[in-house]
Amino acid sequence: MENKINAYNNVLELIGNTPLVKLNKIASGLTGNFYAKVEAFNPGHSSKDRIAAYIIEEAERKGILTKDSTIIETTSGNTGFSIAMVSIIKGYECILAVSSKSSKDKIDMLRSMGAKVYVCPAHVSADDPRSYYEVAKRLHNEVKGSIYINQYFNELNAEAHYRSTGPEIWNQTNGNITHLVACSGTGGTISGTARFLKEKNPNIKIIGVDAFGSVLKKYHETREFDSNEIYPYRIEGLGKNLIPSSTNFDVIDEFIKVTDEESAHTAREISRTEGMFVGYTSGAVMQAVKQLDENGEFGKDSNVVVIFPDHGSRYMSKIYSDQWMEDQGFFDTKHESEPQEIQY
Ligand code: PMP
């Protein structure tokens, strides 16, 4: 008798085909139907698994990578984790150049996933030879047979989503999606997904979420880079201080900005009300939906898909730490009651 085992051959086979989950309580006061594409169900717990696997496999198809090749990127975030994961399974070396601002937890996590992490000074300019951009470029030139993922300037980033996230959403909604609301960092997710959806139905409205302190919204409206828009903010992975070539501004209908504070509270609210422990930018995208609803964007038959990019476990020392929230001045009577103390 054949001994049939139902198993995946490795974790990479679990990338993509993430579930679409109806939002209930958090959307209860809003007009329309709301669904979240929950990217934390990827094996590396974020949407970046899709681009890591796709970009590396494209390089394999083109014959650029050989056994023992090296994959290089400049990130301590989700993309770094995903590249490390793909590299382990495929047997490549993974080098990540990160800023000294990155938390120790993140650096330890990447090292635990087998990545060689170069910690570069945060206070130097991007063109300084010590910056993480320059270190990555130098290593790419020095290490024979290496590839530099360069997610902000790599057209394969959006293509990964054009080929996976877009078709998945179209099929999961049976073509009945009316709006897509998604965060924009590299812009890969929104650009690739939107291009696919607009090819199917040009009337689908595509709304990008940007941060106060980022240039994307203004650039979309004026096609001009305005450095006056730039100031520090706390949400990671959303918005940018430069114009990424991986963003296709033509397929995005409008951008909406959200604050650090409201996004943090909304992420916590999603966890509390929907039982989904989501990351900071999932809070940002839902905050944007609330603002759009207030502006009368949706009708009762709207089918709005939002993308929740990653998992809350990466933000334990940030939005899920009461102390951190307090340190940012994010606790006030408007949002939250006093924490409960147990009396002994
Ligand atoms: N959310 C998080 C947590 C991210 O790390 C990123 C990627 N920078 C995004 C949203 C935005 O995705 P994209 O880069 O595809 O625009």
Image (spheres, rainbow, N blue to C red):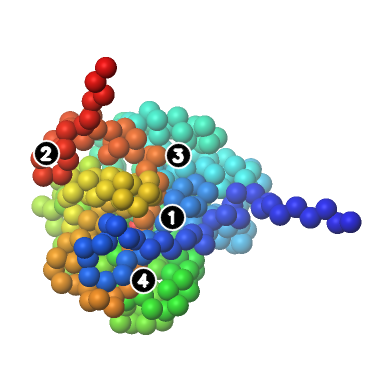
Of circles 3 and 1, which is in front?
1
Q: Is mark 4 within 8 Å of ligand 1?
A: no
Do we see residue 92 in this rendering? no
Asked if labels 1 and 3 touch by Cβ distance under 8 angstroms, the answer is no
Earlier in the chain: of badge 3 and badge 2, it is: 3
The residue that mark 1 highlights is 39
Q: Is mark 3 within 8 Å of ligand 1?
A: no
Q: Amino acid at mark 1?
A: Glu
Secondary structure beneath disc 3? Answer: strand
Do we see residue 14 in this rendering? yes
Distance from the alpha carbon under mark 2 to that under mark 1: 31 Å
Q: Nearer the viewer, residue 138 or 110?
A: 110
Q: Nearer the viewer, residue 110 or 280?
A: 280
The residue that mark 4 highlights is 194
Q: Amino acid at mark 4?
A: Ala
Earlier in the chain: of badge 4 and badge 2, it is: 4
The residue that mark 3 highlights is 96
Earlier in the chain: of badge 3 and badge 1, it is: 1
Secondary structure beneath disc 1? Answer: helix
Of circles 3 and 2, which is in front?
2
Residue at 22% x, 56% y: name it: 287
Q: Is residue 206 above or below residue 112?
A: below
Q: Amino acid at mark 3?
A: Leu
The residue that mark 2 highlights is 332
Which residue is the extreme one toward the right?
1
Distance from the alpha carbon under mark 1 to that under mark 4: 17 Å
- For residue 135, which quarter of the picture? top left
Residue at 49% x, 39% y: name it: 95
Q: Is residue 64 above or below residue 88?
A: below
Residue 161: percent from the left, percent from the top? 44, 64
Residue 207: percent from the left, percent from the top? 26, 67
